[in-house]
Amino acid sequence: MAKQKPSGNFNMVATTLSGLEEVLAEELRALDMEYIKVGNRAVSFSGTLRQMYEANLWCRTAIRILKPIRNFKARDEKDLYEQVQKTNWAEVMDLSQTFAIDAVVSHSTFEHSLFVAQLTKDAIVDQFRKATGERPSVDRVRPDVRINLHMHENMVTLSLDSSGDSLHRRGYRLLTNVAPLNEVLAAGIIALTGWDKKSTFVDPMAGSGTFLIEAALMAQNIAPGIFRRDPFAFESWKDYNKELFEMVWKTAEIKEKREPQAEIIGYDIDPDYVLAARKNIENAGLGHVIKIGLADFFETKATAEQGVVVMNPPYNERILSDDINQLYKQIGDALKNNYQGFDAFVLTGNLDAAKNIGLRASRRTPLYNGAIDCRLLKYELYRGSRRGEGKEEAQQD
């Protein structure tokens, strides 16, 4: 890998969760990336070294930012081994650095990703041993250099993973509940609601506060990577530009809005969850932006004329409810009676139970919460006198 000048453009790939590809593409456009192309759980683009640093710091819906270094076809084991050795790995890493291979294999003559990762590791180690008599060590947990291998129909892309630890691990969450929501999924859902970052935002089943914190980060223009505890992987790269990254970091700090930009409110019926959410909110430095309280959602009422309600109620998967159908019926009743004028978004992995909400969903977005197939259901809660006006708004959408 040749040393990159800060001004030189190169290709990158940002990975994400299924259903959030367009949201991520929009984030990359906001960072002035070029040649943006949406794929399956990934978006490819082109940018500079500075923009790669910015993508890691600013992308709310990216899991990893990869830098492809070689593409080739591997028909068999010998082919794969020889092709991997065509990269001069001494340009990528030193003997003193640890490394790991993350392999993803689909629709190929190779069946096991672990075998492909092992073979790739052998090719790299053997190249070093032949040249120097020594070999770098593998560290699967915290490697200095993380190499990503993606094989589809025997076409291989070898990439350097610039992120290291997954970008969804923001670092602000000290305490979680039984089924914590992935931060990337939470940020993606908020983006899908179209919330304007100014109107009231409510999560009435707040759990450990992920929706609330991600909404506040957006409203306050805080880069999600700013809380990260571990270094980014690119900080171990040979072409790492410390001054450039410090400039990117300081610019992010300057862009933060100190004064609260929106009313962001959360409730939970469980005092332990409220305590956990409060600690996470304080850890993110957002205690002055987010209000969190102990309350039964069914007894809460909107505090504004309009806004957005987002919730992730139990599905009877990881959190069990005594009567899931009754729970969803009550959710529908509470939304209809207590949140008129709001747009409500319910993430659920139990579509049968969701029928009991009793409201007509104006949009259904397929998403995954972990391995659970979910839908993000949108309900437009018109006021009686605004029904006609609401229909016009829906048509414009």
Image (spheres, rainbow, N blue to C red):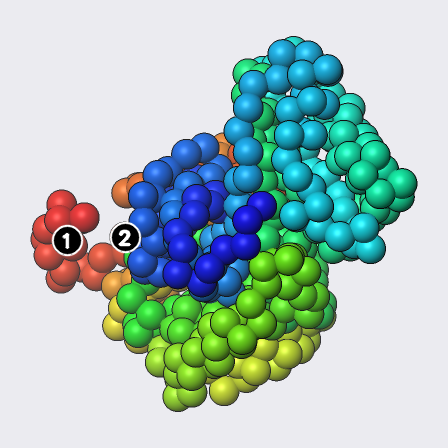
User: Residue at the right extreme?
Assistant: 133
Looking at the image, which residue is at 89% across and 40% down?
133
Q: Quadrant of residue 106?
A: top right
Is residue 188 visible in the rendered image? The answer is: yes
Q: What residue type is labelled 2?
A: Glu
Residue 124 appears left or right of 50: right
Residue where numbered disc 2 is placed:
380
Question: How far is disc 2 from disc 1 in space, using C-alphas?
Answer: 10 Å
Few, some or many residues within 10 Å of mark 2 (<14, 14–19, 20+): many
In percent of the image, x 48 and y 77: which residue is there? 247
- Position of residue 113 relative to residue 52, above or below, is above
The picture places residue 118, in percent across and down from the top left corner, at 79, 29
- Is label 2 in contact with label 1 (beta carbons under 8 Å)? yes
Tell me the element at label 2.
Answer: strand
The residue sitting at 30% across, 72% down in the picture is 199
- In the rendered structure, the answer to whether residue 199 lies left or right of residue 251 reads left
Any mark on residue 393, and which? 1
Q: Position of residue 305 (x, y in %)?
A: 26, 72
**Relative to 79, does residue 119 appear above or below in the rendering?**
below
Where residue 61 appears, as percent x and y from the top left, is: 47, 53
